[in-house]
Amino acid sequence: MSTPDTPSANAGASMSERPDYDSPWKEAIGAYFEPFMRLFFEPVHARIDWHHHHEFLDAELLKITGDSQLGKRFADRLVRVRSRQGQELWLLIHIEIQGQADTSFNHRMFQYYYRIHDHHPEAEIVSLAVLTNQPDCSRLGRYASEHDGYGVQFCFRVHNLQDWAIQWEPLKAQAASNPFAVVALAQLAAHRKASDPERKASKREIIWLLYHYHYAREDALALLRFIDWMLRLPRALELELRNELITLEESTKMPYVMSFEQMALERGEKRGEKRGEERGEKRGETKALLRMIQARFGPPTPEQLQQIESADIPQLDTWLDRLLTASTLEELLDG
């Protein structure tokens, strides 16, 4: 299911081979930028000339906002595109995954806007925000500081992912032609308060779409990586699910899970029963956790590193499950 804007071979290479040092959202937007815009911001998508190359300006974003909260957030992207009229547009994309945004969020978005505008006044900046776990976004999207009709008004587009929670089936249908719908489904399922068997059922339902809609193998592996990151399961249930998928593959003739198993090996989860493999699993999970902590929070202190390296596998699993919802490394390790 490749698109002209996101060649499947490139997407697969960027998301299934490189180390896990970026957030899954950042990787997914990089690999599937056009489908992302089409799903979440259709009016802006319609303005863009998709035959023209788009450029990610994350290094520029970090330079401009490096002393602000935005510069430390791992899921933000700045993208230069060309409009259908030939104008240059800079899209500031902010993803709010953890917690819930309050009205101060509007002010922060304005701060990010004027910092970029101050450095590049010639650019038309389009500010976009996706909130993945926000019950109500009605007070978000507008910042005003004015009196007697004078002052500043700033408006930006907000997409509330939770709006899709009651439109689960339509979102599944979108996955037929838009791979980012799979990303959205995985994030929604990750935010649900559900038992492990319910999470397994959701994970299987989402993965099944890749077979049902005949995704190209490279795209399927890229999306499987995201799904696996977001919807971690206890080892026994994970093995059950993979066995079910292997059975499914025998009927569909689409071999995804063999490479999916390779992703598991990167976390040390070999399927054999040798005694030494448990030590390999712990080393793999520790290494994966440290990579993701580095991406989210920066390097741990020596004390935190010792705490992580001395943890057992269940504790490592707990930290991995909570990684995207913890606000700080201290909150992650102390909870």
Image (cartoon, grey):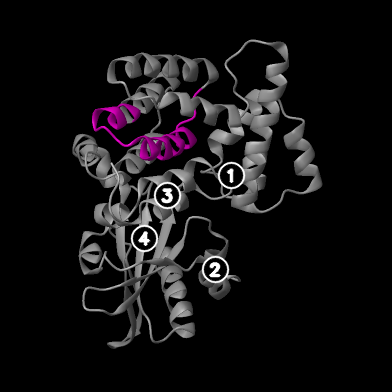
**Mark 2 highlights which residue?**
59
Q: Which secondary structure, mark 3?
A: helix
Horizontally, residue 135 falls left or right of residue 259, namely left
The residues tagged by marks 2 and 3 sit, at their Cα atoms, a distance apart of 21 Å
Q: Which secondary structure, mark 2?
A: helix
The residues tagged by marks 4 and 2 sit, at their Cα atoms, a distance apart of 19 Å
**Mark 1 highlights which residue?**
19
| Front in this rendered view, residue 89 or 8 | 8
The residues tagged by marks 1 and 3 sit, at their Cα atoms, a distance apart of 15 Å
How many other residues sit within 10 Å of disc 1, few (<14), some (14-19) or many (≥20)?
A: few
Depth-wise, is mark 4 or mark 3 nearer the camera?
3
**Mark 4 or 3 closer to N-term?**
3
The residue drawn where x is 21% and y is 78% is 85
**Mark 4 or 2 closer to N-term?**
2
User: Residue 193: x, y in percent?
Assistant: 40, 31
How many other residues sit within 10 Å of disc 3, few (<14), some (14-19) or many (≥20)?
A: few
Region in magenta = 207-233
User: Residue 88: x, y in percent?
Assistant: 33, 78
Depth-wise, is mark 1 or mark 3 nearer the camera?
3
Q: Please, what is the three-letter code of the amino acid marked with disc 4?
A: Ala
